[in-house]
Image (tube, rainbow, N blue to C red):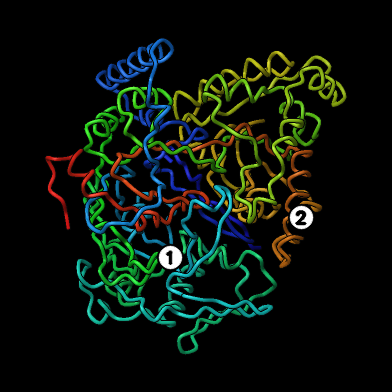
Amino acid sequence: MRKFRLLAPALLASGMLAMLLIMGCGGSDDDSTTTSTTTESSSAASTAASSSSSTSEAAAETKEEAKAEATTATTTETTSAAAPAATSGDVAQPQYGGEWTFQSTSPRIGQDPINTTGTGYFYNWGTALSSLLRYKMDPSICSGCYEIIGDLADSWTVDGLDVTLHINPDAKWQGSGAPTVAGLNGRNFTAEDAVFGVKRLAGEGSYHVGYWAAMESVSADGDNVKFKLKYPSATFIPNVAYGFNKMSAPEAVDAGGGNLQNGPTIGTSGFTVDCEVDVQCVYTRNPDFHLSDDNGNQLPYLSQARNIIIPDVQARFAAFRARKLDTHGITAEQRIIIDRQYPEIQNDEIKHYGSWFIHFRNDQAPWNDKRVRQAVSKSIDRQEIYDTIYGGLAHMSLAMAMPAAEAYLPQEEFKKAWKRDCTEAKSLLTAAGFPDGLDAKFWVANYSETTIAVVELMQQQLKECGIRIELFIHDRATYLARVFTRHGEFEDMAYGPQGIFTADQWLSAYYHSEGGRNSSWTDDPELDKMIDAQRQQMDPAKRNQELLDIQAYLLDQTYQAVILTGYSRTSHQPYIKNYAYSSGLDYPGRRHVEHIWVDKDEYLTYRNEKEWID
């Protein structure tokens, strides 16, 4: 029997997934450049992972500094708000050359793109690889939506069960700067290459096979790749574009001894990549890249990008303040310091659809009674959590990236359903047979100090409504192995993060009875039918309505209790331009790097100790 499987949350601790069967999102090694309010700050997460007295002292200094700045901000006029710096999305003529430096996950070795979902691979070596299609990077696209455009395939048609992709005649395997593999470097990417890459991704042992579940067969026909589907699928094309579905070359796989666990890494993207584990990854511009921007300018603009590995979180912030890093995911405290001391810094706050949520053991009493699940949800004051811990920077959703803005359930519906009501919670518990309240275990994935602060606040809120929870705090590995997996092994309830997924990917993997990430043991035949139907609904307006109906149904059933979805908070040096986003921050494609450019004059002004890289 086929299973869906999402291998791990796309932890944007800086800051998408399938059809019937194995899906993958987000490696547990994520520590990227953006800070998400739903997945805690990179500062807190890393401090929890590795603390030291010097780090603790530096953190205390940052807090004290932020407190002092906040106090000053309430008593001193500032001109930075009245005259904000230009944002990273400003429209201007892009310039070629320069280097962008940032801090992300350290590169990992021994990983093949078909059997990992880790950012240690995809944020580093995986950046050299391309997919057949991609998500468009454009500020006009709503933060939770997506638009598909060409990449290695420049066009496509869908005719019932027949899908045809036409290969971009300009696409080539990397030459200069890439490892040398006989017969590969510089040759054109072909339809046969696409078939090879797809069969690897859809084959046995691949973590990404679920994206291709609708595929009956794939074949090459001249410059075209032809797919025969098993059933009509509204989600096949978006899945082809997803960031895990990177193409690999047959010659490279042969050179690697049948896999790519130790390379060679030769792709077709805008950058070749050279990495030193725990030191850095250098991305060098591919002069033969096949894509251009909307004005016909060849991508990428940068000559080079550099991921500098800095394990100490306070050292990262210090490096950003010293302009050794050009982009950095920041905490609320760090934002206060930046706003007061560095008014030229550009700050982005981007809504996304990753979340923190409560899993229930829906297969066991009392959690198989929706009144008990609803009582838990009604006992939690989400707004207090948002205001107290996240500075109000959060929003309500069921944490799925919809195909259109019209497919999102309005915020008013969530606010009504999730308004705290202890009287109603106690009434629900009484009706379910618990007039004196309920005692339960509550597993907690300890990703950071912020996680624990949220849970302790929830513990107090739940107790006030008659639900007494005993916390079992465990590490990230336990969450991935025993909670966020098919048929979780936790007791009663568990709390942890999920990544950013398209609606079908998350519904299929988490809520469908055959879902590979069905950690809460959900088994609802009516819901299964709704999930299967929306996937095959080819009319966009009708599918939007079906997705709205599913959200309303889930809101009532409360098979999980989403606590918050949030924003990614990122800061950039003033010379960094066009830091583009798409749905889910294009996790894990890293394709936004191809759109970044550097203003040379500003760069030399602010970083005059560094020479310009042409």
Direction from residue 419 to residue 430 in the image, left or right: right
| Res. 223 image quadrant | bottom left
Crowd around label 1: few <14 · some 14–19 · many ≥20 (10 Å): few
Percent position (x, y) of residue 401? 60, 50
Residue positioned 55% across, 19% down in the render: 388
Crowd around label 2: few <14 · some 14–19 · many ≥20 (10 Å): some
Percent position (x, y) of residue 523? 75, 48
For disc 1, the marked residue is 294
Decide which of tag 2 and tag 1 comes sooner along the chain: 1
Direction from residue 600 to residue 452 in the image, left or right: right
Direction from residue 313 to residue 132 in the image, left or right: right
Q: Residue furthest bottom?
A: 222
Residue positioned 62% across, 18% down in the render: 459
Percent position (x, y) of residue 218? 54, 80
| Res. 464 image quadrant | top right
Tell me, for residue 249, which label it has, or none: none
| Identity, as a three-letter code, of the amino acid under mark 2 | Glu
Residue positioned 23% across, 53% down in the render: 282
Query: Could you give the CA–CA distance between mark 2 and mark 1, rounded to whole angstroms?
Result: 34 Å
In front of the other: 124 or 436: 124
Question: Quick check: 595 above or below 179?
Answer: above
Asked if the residue under mark 1 is in contact with the one under mark 2, i.e. CB atoms within 8 Å, the reply is no
> Dot 2 lies on which element?
helix
Percent position (x, y) of residue 412? 73, 35
For disc 2, the marked residue is 546
| Res. 542 image quadrant | bottom right
| Identity, as a three-letter code, of the amino acid under mark 1 | Asp
Question: Quick check: 366 above or below 168?
Answer: above
